[in-house]
Amino acid sequence: MATKAVTRYRTRFVRRPRSRSKSKTTIPLAVVAGFVPLATFAYEGYQAGGLYNAAARVAQRLTGYDSTYRVFIPAELMKGWGPILAGFGVHWLASRIGINRALGRAGVPLLRL
């Protein structure tokens, strides 16, 4: 009686998909830095007139509308959104160039550009 031939396939050269780790929480420093001028403007308003004045100043910088004089000021809108959008732009550019990936591979915890 003849035995049946058994074929063995070698998986030595077969590439297996790489496992990916779960992404961790990071803080984009460029975006946070874009909010610093708004925060200082609000803090100065808090020192001058309390919490109501600070909230009015934040609303003025983010909407461009001055509630005390009831007028729209485009320059205030740009002073509020300009640094924030610049921070987003720097963060996007750093991601496209690969700086954030390099920071992650270097083991820098929690912070990205």
Image (cartoon, rainbow, N blue to C red):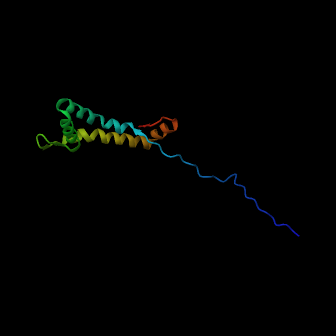
Query: Farthest bottom residue?
Result: 1
- Vertical position of residue 64 compared to residue 49: above or below: below
Looking at the image, which residue is at 72% across and 55% down? Answer: 10
| Percent of width and height locating residue 19 | 57, 49
Q: Quadrant of the N terminus?
A: bottom right
| Percent of width and height locating residue 46 | 21, 32
In this view of the protein, which residue sits in the foreground, 43 or 82? 43
- Say how many tags the image has: 0
In this view of the protein, which residue sits in the foreground, 67 or 10? 67
Looking at the image, which residue is at 23% across and 38% down? Answer: 79
| Percent of width and height locating residue 17 | 59, 52
The reply, left or right, for residue 106 in relation to residue 34 is right
Q: Quadrant of the C terminus?
A: top left
Query: Farthest left residue?
Result: 69
Looking at the image, which residue is at 85% across and 66% down? Answer: 3
Looking at the image, which residue is at 87% across and 68% down? Answer: 2
The reply, left or right, for residue 73 in relation to residue 110 is left
| Percent of width and height locating residue 7 | 77, 62
Which quarter of the figure has residue 14? bottom right
Which quarter of the figure has residue 36? top left
Query: Farthest right residue?
Result: 1
Query: Farthest front residue?
Result: 51
